[in-house]
Image (cartoon, rainbow, N blue to C red):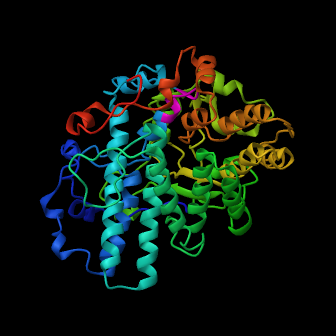
Amino acid sequence: MKSLRSKSLKVIFGIFLLGSFSSCSDFLEEDPQNQVATSNYYTTQQDAIAAVNSIYAYLGSYNAGNTAGVYHSTFWVTMGLASDEMLSNQLGTPQFDQLANFSHNAENAAVLEIWQMHYKTIYLANIAIDRVPQIDMDEELRARLVNEAKFLRGLLYFNLVRMFGEVPLLVSEETPLNPEVSSVDEIYAQIVQDLRDAKDLPKDGEIQQGRATSGAATALLAKVYLTMGEYQLASEEAMEVINEHPYDLWEDFSDNFRMTNRGGQEAIFSVGFGNGGGAISFWEVGQFNVRLLPSVLSSEAGITNAQGWQYATNDLYETFSEEDERREATFLTEFQANDGTTVNLDRVWIDKYWDRIAEPTAGDSFQDFPVLRYSDVLLIYAEAQARLGNFEEANEYLNIVRKRAGLEEVEASDIEGFIDLIVAERGREFVAEGKRWFDLVRLGRLEEAVMDAKGVQVSNTHYLFPIPQRERDVNPNLPQNDGY
């Protein structure tokens, strides 16, 4: 559920042992004053809470040592650039240019960062899963904390297996120096097991805001089953979320991105940013506005630190009809300058994360990053029903999302027609939410979509990312994906 700002970040440096990841040794510098001897740790209930909080912290945090959290920026930017969604305008970042034009290879710095941060965070989860059960503490809290860690590990491996295919499946803090990769089936089996365990978590509203819930585990499991092609199971898990958990669509799409609605009715699991009222030492503000708002706003409209590093493709913008209320809520094509004149922009920028009331000067943001929203569950159920041949049910749930956007109902009677509709609808619903590459790959539309939007030829090679060469140099047991 929602977003969590950990108060236990200093613990990270004591419990995060990087020996198993020697290639990452220069990525995180330790402060000896912050180290905690492991022989004196994992002994109290507070230790258990801090250990699990440190996993959440690595989802979003960013510190002076350039340790970017999993969902801080690189991950969702990569999923937008390596698709038909976004282009890059950031000087001095060839890794993003390469992703946008599909010239990336195993040396790509963004792909390396994603790999490293996922495994660092998985390692923290493994520590908690191994150590917390040994602590003499409240039994109910102990079980809950372990299941939160399992939810987060399942989420991270779901990202990795979809991006890279066969990867090392590390489920204990005790790991071989050079682990071999596991099969895709083995990885998915572990993800499913972790999420099934996590379904025992409290429901939304029965636990501190920001922590994983049974609703989040069930929703993610539905998405995992959909990706695996287990459509009946995906339908069942999605319908459980719809029937048994307290989620709903906001009447207005824009309400998802109002600061006053953080953790609101449509948020199933989000990563939050902020400094916990001064309790967090890491720089943990989000870069949504920094990256997505044009730099001209800083000089002409009093906006701070708008850099315009990434922007939308024209093709994406043109998929929105004038009737689609999400178009105005998502994009910026003109603005009022300080002198009152209207400035027309020569590119389409994304301003959906900018809450003009709560953060009038934009810049660094305390906005949440939406990992799972309720609209995603509705569309998962719709697609799964279509795959099962139940088009009346599939159309009904697709049209729930369209109706909220102010669009007329549509109706498909065959799977190809429905997939055309779902590709377009998910593209409009989840702009800059880190989903587009995954959707296009899963639905088999990557080549067509990228050619239409960017005029770039892509192939089956790009249905996976390359295993980072730096990791392969350290671990000779890591293979390379075809084409790289």
Q: Which residue is drawn at 33% across and 23% down?
A: 92
Q: Give the range drawn in magenta.
A: 79-86
Task: Locate residue 135 relative to residue 287 in the image: left or right.
Answer: left
Q: Can residue 344 be seen in this view?
A: no
Q: Quadrant of the C terminus?
A: top left
- Front-most of 377 and 368? 377
Rendered location of residue 141, percent (x, y): 44, 80
Residue 26 position (above or below residue 472): below
- Front-most of 257 and 455? 455
Q: Residue at x 55, y 34 (%)?
A: 437
Q: Residue at x 38, y 46 (%)?
A: 182
Residue 222 falls within the magenta-colored stretch? no
Q: Quadrant of the N terminus?
A: bottom right
Rendered location of residue 387, percent (x, y): 74, 43
Q: How many labels does the image show?
A: 0
Q: Quadrant of residue 469?
A: top left
Rendered location of residue 183, percent (x, y): 43, 45
Taking the view exactly as shown, the residue that stands out farthest to the left is 32
Residue 382 position (above or below residue 466): below
Task: Locate residue 469 relative to residue 439 in the image: left or right.
Answer: left
Residue 82 falls within the magenta-colored stretch? yes
Q: Is residue 461 visible?
A: yes
Rendered location of residue 229, percent (x, y): 63, 45
